[in-house]
Image: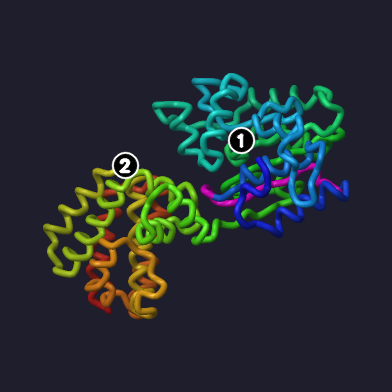
Amino acid sequence: MQFNSIPGQEELKSHLIEEVKGGKISHAQLFAGKAGHATLPMALAFVQYLFCENKQEKDSCGTCPSCKKVSDLQHPDLHFSFPTVQTISKTTNPLLALWRTQIQEQPIFDLYHWTKRMDDKERKPIIGTEESLEIVKKLSLKSYEGGYKVMLIWMAEEMNATCANKLLKILEEPPAKTLFLLVTDNPDKLLTTILSRTQILRISSYPIDIIQQVVERSGIGRQLAESIAARSNGNLIDAQQIMGDQSEANLFRELFIQLMRVCFKKDVNAMLDWTDAISALSREGQKQFVQYALHMVRQSLLKNYTQDMLTRVSQEEAAFLANFARFISNNNALDFMEIFNDAHYHLDRNAFGKLLFTQLCFQVMRFIHRA
């Protein structure tokens, strides 16, 4: 993985390069960003630059033996730790081949997609007690190539209490020439004592135009690519998911149209039927629908105030917004955003979907008549 394969983030790249050049490398660094951001690729690009035998001004060479080993995820001084389903394996070692395949096929992924690849039952993975012993064991070994040893812990917030406390002890008295790279989607879930011992590096979202370029390269037309990029909010995972299942995108569009129509008509029976339909989706599907609804509210506002100059919608969405956008205004836009954001928050915390969406219907019915 090279820095040039990651769009943007130039300031952070320069910071990491200068760390290595100046020989002042923090022994514990936390790569923090939301799922769908380039947290893991950035950490891997940093490792490759660190180990590179022929460093360039702004990147690793990509061709020396060390670069090739890191690129293949086979460098003997690069160790990985990541969440595992405990009934499958309590340590990462038996799953390393699967881990390498995941990164080589798609280096930007989240815990949900990793879990699906690892376990068809989708049980919750953690970084557990046995894995903490493996971390200590690996770091007790001498460096194979005489330089740094690197322990990269992906989704570090999934460490259980025992593992987190063992890591804290190591961070307090780190072995010589050992680097810890923690990758996280949610740094707030880490122990504050761990956070205080790391250098926190923030990975920002992808620019919308970069997401659009990625989508267009897959053969999707420009107008639809604009809509997908706008819906993704700079999250490459979301963009790929939308792009990979247009039937689901069509379903979300129809559900949104139905929601607005039945709520505008104040048709309570139809609202309850709609609630049944949305409740039949998976939890992840419900969350994605709520994100889609937020997208449509934002695009309605853009249409009202920019006359389509800044809207990013598909042809089908544009046809609907031509008549619908006027129902979203300064009088209710914030209300709509609040109820959809709240719905996503509560779905993320396992709220009962049917009750949540029933309440949502009545809130939409109230707000849509405020335009």
Examine the structure image and report whether residue 29 is included in the region drawn in magenta: yes
The nearer-to-camera label among 1 and 2 is 2
Label 2 packing within 10 angstroms: few (<14), some (14-19), many (20+): few
Residue type at the position of mark 1:
Met
Q: Main secondary structure of the magenta part?
A: loop
Q: In this image, 370 relative to 121: left or right?
A: left
Q: Foreground residue, 250 or 60?
A: 60
Q: In this image, 22 relative to 344: left or right?
A: right
Number of marks in picture: 2
Q: In this image, 370 relative to 24: left or right?
A: left
State how far apart marks 1 and 2 are (Cα).
27 Å
Examine the structure image and report whether residue 3 is included in the region drawn in magenta: no
Residue 20 is situated, as x and y percent measured from the top left of the image, at 82, 46
Q: Foreground residue, 98 or 122?
A: 98
Report if the CB atoms under discs 1 and 2 are less than 8 Å apart. Answer: no
Q: Quadrant of the C terminus?
A: bottom left
Q: What is the number of the mark on residue 282?
A: 2
Residue 355 is situated, as x and y percent measured from the top left of the image, at 27, 52
Residue type at the position of mark 2:
Ser
Instruction: Answer with mark 1 or mark 2, whichever residue precedes in sequence.
Output: 1
Q: Which residues are magenta?
A: 24-36
Residue that carries the numbered disc 1 in the rendered image: 159
Residue 175, placed above or below residue 260 = above
Q: Residue at x 23, y 66 (%)?
A: 320
Residue 138 is situated, as x and y percent measured from the top left of the image, at 74, 24
Q: Quadrant of the N terminus?
A: top right
Tag 1, which secondary structure?
Answer: loop
Tag 2, which secondary structure?
Answer: loop
Q: Residue at x 42, y 48 (%)?
A: 348
